Amino acid sequence: EAEVAQSPRYKITEKSQAVAFWCDPISGHATLYWYRQILGQGPELLVQFQDESVVDDSQLPKDRFSAERLKGVDSTLKIQPAELGDSAMYLCASTRKSGNSPLHFGNGTRLTVT
Amino acid sequence: KQEVTQIPAALSVPEGENLVLNCSFTDSAIYNLQWFRQDPGKGLTSLLLIQSSQREQTSGRLNASLDKSSGRSTLYIAASQPGDSATYLCAAYGNQFYFGTGTSLTVIP
């Protein structure tokens, strides 16, 4: 079964450093989401792409976070500079089309900021 | 804004028991509701998706129901097994996916 690929699985970084996460959605999935999940809570949307265009980045802290999906396939989420409060699981998900089809998640990147 | 609630936050049952997990949402204008399973340190695995026009969906020992008018969905797990131990989350889709905080299920052998 096709999967959403994410790397790295774990990342430890010092505060004020830059960090980047990569995601490759299931082939043919036009819609890509980045979520942040804090332990014991549900995922919260950071940014949604439809092909290469940003559909919703209203919850993305744009002073330090950026996301791109240049060719409408894989995507990168960057944090610069990282803060202690950014420690969380960063999850990528994709759907065939926006919303009305199953959402598939990758295994996430566990970020620890020291 | 859509609010999704899952009660209880944690549940412990003996192996073989049938159980029901609850999900409630405040805005009934949804297109679908999806149930997920999350194992520790992993991403979410899709279990069932119920379209707004449907009342229920079944997959193996799992059955999910949806009542939009009352803002409720339930996930029924039959004959629970230790391998079912995980956190179960629901997500309601309107203009975006809104997630509950999950129910942590432990099935005791």
Image (cartoon, rainbow, N blue to C red):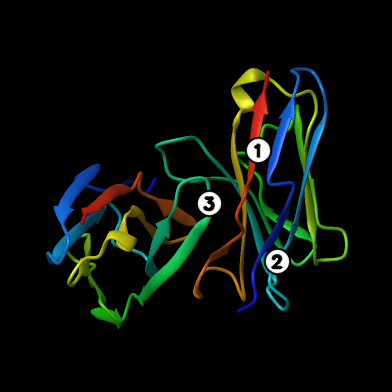
- B1 left or right of A114 in image: left
Is A100 displayed left or right of A88 in the figure? left
Identified at 25% across, 79% down, the residue is B56
Q: CA distance from mark 3 to mark 1?
A: 23 Å
Q: Which residue is mark 3?
A: B42
Mark sitting on residue A25: 2
User: What residue is pinned by disc 1?
Assistant: A60
Asked whether disc 3 touches disc 1, contact meaning CB atoms under 8 Å apart, the reply is no
Name the residue type under label 3.
Lys
Q: Nearer the viewer, mark 3 or mark 1?
A: 3
Q: Position of residue B99 (x, y in %)?
A: 41, 51
Q: Are marks 3 and 1 on the same chain?
A: no
Residue projecting furthest to the right: A71
B104 or B99, nearer to the observer? B104
Q: At 35% across and 48% down in the image, what residue appears?
A: B100
Q: Where B65 falls versus B26 (above or below)?
A: below
The x and y percentages for residue A82 are 74, 24
Mark 2: few, some, or many residues within 10 Å (few <14, many ≥20)? many
> Which residue occupies the extreme front position in the image?
B109
Quadrant (top left/top right/bottom left/bottom right) for the C terminus of chain B: bottom left
Q: Quadrant of residue A78?
A: top right
Distance from disc 2 to disc 1, alpha carbons, whole Å, reads: 20 Å
Q: Is residue A4 left or right of residue A64?
A: left
Bin the neighbour count of mark 1 within 10 Å (Cα to Cα): few under 14, some 14-19, many 20 and up: some
- Residue at mark 2: chain: A
Q: Is residue B73 visible?
A: yes
Q: Give whichever of discs 2 and 1 has the lower sequence position.
A: 2
Circle 3 SS class: loop
For mark 1, give the secondary structure. loop
Q: Quadrant of residue A71?
A: bottom right
In the image shown, does B53 or B62 lie closer to the viewer? Answer: B62
Label 1 resides on the chain identified as A
